[in-house]
Image (tube, rainbow, N blue to C red):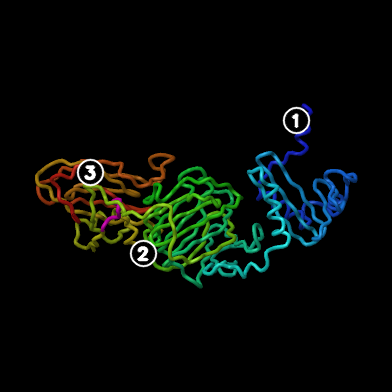
Amino acid sequence: MPIAQQERSFFVLITNSTDFTRFIKAIIRGELLSRSSYEELFRVQSKPAEGHAYQNEEGTLSWGLGWVREDSEHGLIYQHGGNNGDFTCYFELSLDEEWGYVFFTNSDKGEPIRDLLRPLLFDGVGDLTAFELPGIDRLSVNDWSVAGQFDHLQILTEEDLCLYPDAQATLEEKQYQNMIIEFDVLMREGEGAAGINFRQKNPRNYETFYLSVGESATANAMQYTPVFNGHFGWQLYHGSNYNRTAYLRADDWVHVKMVILGDWMEVYLHNAPQHALHVFDLKHPVQPGDITLWSEVPACFANFSVSEISTYDFHYDRLPKPSPPPGTILQWEVSQDFGDFATALASMTTELNTWNTIGVEYNGLLNLGRLHVESNTGNCAIAKVNIYSELAQTKALQFGYSDEVQVFLNGKKIFTGDRTAFYRDAQDWAKIRQDDTIYLDLEAGENELSFIVQEYFGGWGIMARFPDPEGLQLAGE
């Protein structure tokens, strides 16, 4: 090995602030090494000669194995720094008082930053609770009612709440409507998500936001979706207003900030100044509700706080929601839930159906989960619409559905389709889109178009529009 490379290998340490903090905590607690090894580690190994540039006026600097020892007014301090030009860092610790600090910067200003921070970190700024901002609830592990297996671990703070798969923790003493939520979350490796429900009316109806470390660097890494009657709607609600790419690592802390006001929400990750997700149409009514943490993989939550707000300067100006494009079917008649295709099909020849009129959302989506409760054995319902045609003609209909569908025109089956996740393609998440087209041979006058839709998981709905609606009259227009 060349001498330059050989020398470099003795002093280069590649790490990050989170891992290095764990190392410092282990040193303070006396973990990892034997007592005799620690005594050698902290013993004076060398001292600079009198008048040396590294010696201070009091002559109190010396070196142990890998750090500087300094006798200060705060006792014996162990310290070291790092300087790679545009990256500077520093740490100090006290074994006697069992404290320390670490900071890493991507700047050449680490030394002046240290000089500014050092008096605050050593001497403090008094009783910080006296400066607590009003309206902020900082929550401890004892504020949560937990269902499922959990631990109180000290990884990031003494208040870490660690949930095992399928556990939930609900803040039941107080409900929130408009708020800023902040917390840190660490997820273990695995397929699944960890998230937070807010404005939770009951265990089956709420808004939810979640992160999935197994989907890092994809558009499935971060998702907002409403939950109606137990139906998660992530297959129905997708695109930049609902899910975005995020870069996550297993066993690494992510700071999350959620600003929720009215039917708007902005989410910030990693303390970045730019929001990571903007939602302009939260789906549930704006009303107070519970907050619940949940996870499908082992995950820890720390530093949780909630502050109530009445106003916020969002990045985007509030604009009217878009309208469905021309030709969209705006209103459907929806039957009761039959559970399966066979029962729903048999009901089409009887008069036993109970029909409810339901309008679509701004993008033309009919979310059937708004009407029927999620079932472990599957859900199946009929949605129909009457179409008046001025003359006998053939019209194209573009539509999307989740998860399976049978389509009937005037009582005759004309289409069967399956969009269950991964059925068409190994990478297909079955997110609803108007990417199927059928041609309807319409009779002059009234025509009845019916969809029998089967749900398995991830969202239950349909959307349909005529690209050329000329000569047609649709219900709800």
- Name the residue type under label 1: Gln
Count of number-bearing discs: 3
Q: Which mark is residue 447?
A: none
- Name the residue type under label 2: Pro
The answer to which image quadrant residue 439 occupies is: top left
User: Could you say whether the residue bearing mark 1 is in a helix, strand or loop?
Assistant: helix
Viewer-side label of 2, 1? 1
What's the magenta bit mostly, secondary-structure-wise? loop
Q: How far separated are the C-alphas under marks 2 and 1?
A: 63 Å
- Name the residue type under label 3: Leu
**Residue bearing mark 2:** 285
| Residue 140 among magenta residues | no
Front residue of 260/469: it is 260
**Residue bearing mark 3:** 397
Residue pictured at 52% horizontal, 63% vertical: 168
Mark 2: few/some/many CA within 10 Å (<14, 14-19, 20+): few
N-terminal of the pair, mark 2 or mark 1, is 1
User: Could you say whether the residue bearing mark 2 is in a helix, strand or loop?
Assistant: loop
**Residue bearing mark 1:** 5
N-terminal of the pair, mark 1 or mark 3, is 1
In the image, is 309 to the left or to the right of 109?
left
In the image, is 168 to the left or to the right of 41?
left
Given the current orientation, which residue lies at the most extreme bottom position?
Answer: 173
Start and end of the magenta stretch? 359-365
In the image, is 156 to the left or to the right of 392?
right
Residue pictured at 38% horizontal, 46% vertical: 431
Mark 3: few/some/many CA within 10 Å (<14, 14-19, 20+): some
Q: How far separated are the C-alphas under marks 1 and 3?
A: 68 Å
